[in-house]
Image (cartoon, grey):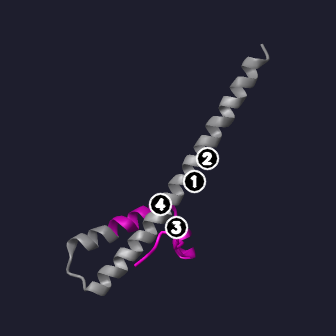
Amino acid sequence: MTSEVEQPTAESEALGYEQARDELIEVVRRLEAGGTTLEESLALWERGEELAKVCRRRLDGARARLDAALAEESAAEEGEDGGR
C-alpha cells in the first residue's frame, strides 16, 4: 500500500501530464475490466496512485505558473495606473 509521503519515481516524473493521464486512464480501464490477479490488481493500483500524483504535481505547477503570470500582469497594471 502506498502512503501520501511516497514520491513518484524518476521515471514517472519524466512523464508529461498527457502521458501520465493517458497511462492512468489505461490503468483504471484495466482495473475496472477485472480478470487480474490480486497481485496484478495491487500493482496496477499502486501505479495508478503514482500516476495520479504526477498529474496532480503537473497541474499544481501549471496553476502556480498561471497565478504568477496573472500577479505579474496585475502588478504591471497597478504600476501603470499609479503613475497617472
Q: Nearer the viewer, residue 34 or 18?
A: 34
List x then y, in percent, for residue 40.
Answer: 31, 84
Instruction: Specify the label residue 55 is tagged with.
Output: 4
**Is disc 1 placed on a helix, strand or loop?**
helix
List x then y, in percent, for residue 68.
Answer: 64, 42
Instruction: Specify the label residue 65 is tagged with.
Output: 2
Mark toward the viewer: 2 or 3: 2
**Is disc 4 placed on a helix, strand or loop?**
helix
**Is disc 3 placed on a helix, strand or loop?**
loop
The residue at the point 39 percent across, 64 percent down is 22
Which image quarter is the C terminus in?
top right
The residue at the point 27 percent across, 68 percent down is 29
Give the CA separation, mark 1 to mark 4: 10 Å
**Is disc 2 placed on a helix, strand or loop?**
helix
Q: Which residue is mark 1?
A: 61
List x then y, in percent, for residue 36.
Answer: 24, 82
- Residue 35 quadrant: bottom left
Which image quarter is the N terminus in?
bottom left
Mark 4 and 3 residues: CB-CB less than 8 Å, in contact? Answer: no
Q: Which residue is mark 3?
A: 15
Mark 1 and 4 residues: CB-CB less than 8 Å, in contact? Answer: no
Mark 1 vs 3, N-terminal side: 3
Q: Which residues are magenta?
A: 1-26
Give the CA separation, mark 4 to mark 3: 9 Å
Identify residue type, mark 3: Leu
Give the CA separation, mark 2 to mark 3: 19 Å
Identify residue type, mark 2: Arg
Identify residue type, mark 1: Gly
Magenta span includes 71: no
Mark 4 vs 3, N-terminal side: 3
List x then y, in percent, for residue 6.
Answer: 52, 73
